[in-house]
Amino acid sequence: MKKRPFGLAVAQLGPIDKEESRASAVQRLHEMMREAASRGADMVVFPELALTTFFPRYWMTEQEAQARYFERTMPGPETQILFDTARELGIGFYLGYAEISAQGRPYNTSILVDKNGDIVGRYRKVHLPGHSDHKPTAPFQHLEKKYFDVGNEGFFVWETMQANIGMCLCNDRRWPETWRMLSLQGADIVALGYNTPSVNIHWPEPTHLRMLHHLVTLQSAAYQNCVWIGAAAKAGLEDGSHLIGGSVIVAPTGEIMAQAQSEDDEVIFCQADLALGDTFKQHVFNLAAHRRPEHYRLIVDQVGAGEPLGRAPVD
């Protein structure tokens, strides 16, 4: 197949301390956007909740969180420079942030911005992890279920920048339904931002499994859904809590094509050939030819695990 080159960059953020201003965080994003453009990127992927510290680790009222950490407009006065620079340099971007909707609802949101600096897509996180109750004995909280509503718009793919681009956020990556929904819409690229702690407060998970499962999930998702994945982390020791980092670009082959080497601000880049995904869609995972949805009803009809449905064969 004829090559379809796409310059894909991922901008990892080092820690954003609780007292760091939005203006400071945006300046860091701005500098990495310029670096990505200088390397030939068509799009740069920024992390989840990229404008502030990972505030769901703190117990506070919803009103206090919204006043301090949420955005009511996008772009706003502090983020406008990212949109202006996208237009100036001809580079698109994905950005994760905490959104207050026009209806006053709180969402963990990402947007897709094209090379003209226009918002062309929005995603609101569906698979919220963590808890909503106070856990005072835990080393930190993970209160996404307290501060955010479950996303109300589902999973979509947008045709923009000569590619079909989907979005998801953090915990969404662990759920195969996320990737299949995007694959069924012909996604070439999926942009993912995340903040993943090294410590699991819910059970004594060995620390090394956090990175292992992160990478295994992305590599299998890229392969089984024939997509390129740009995954951008918030990384390092933030407010005394460690985030795993591990920002990567993964090809439809399941191979890691670029990976962050630090836990600081860092741009990684790959000249992705989107035709590679087309090849896998034609020859390996030809969904139209081989899927059998009549046998998958349990996936959508049932939420949790139920009783086995096996029965003795009848000739």
Image: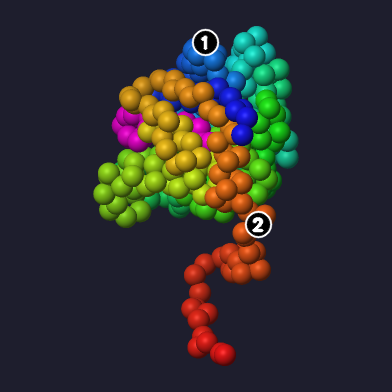
Residues in magenta, as a range: 228-245
The residue located at (51%, 23%) in the rendering is: 271
Place of residue 192 in the rendered image (x, y in percent of width and height, measured from the top left): 52, 36
On residue 289, the disc is: 2
Q: Secondary structure at mark 2?
A: helix
CB-based contact (under 8 Å), mark 1 and mark 2 = no
Please check the rendered image and state whether residue 243 is part of the magenta-colored stretch, yes or no: yes
Q: Identify residue for label 1.
A: 38
Q: Quadrant of the N terminus?
A: top right
**Kind of residue at badge 1:** Ser
| Furthest-bottom residue in this view | 315
**Type of residue at label 2?**
Ala
Relative placement, left or right, of 147 versus 14 is: right
Instruction: Look at the numbered disc 1 and give the secondary structure of its residue.
Output: helix
Callout 2: 10 Å neighbours few (<14), some, many (20+)? Answer: few
Does 40 appear above or below 194? above
1 vs 2, front mark: 2
Residue at image location 34% in from the left, 49% down from the top? 201
- Looking at the image, residue 162 sits to the left or right of residue 70; the answer is right
Question: Which of these two is toward me, 257 or 110?
Answer: 257
Alpha carbons under labels 1 and 2: distance apart? 41 Å
Q: Is residue 75 above or below residue 314?
A: above
The main secondary structure of the magenta stretch is strand
Q: Say which quadrant the C terminus sits in.
A: bottom right
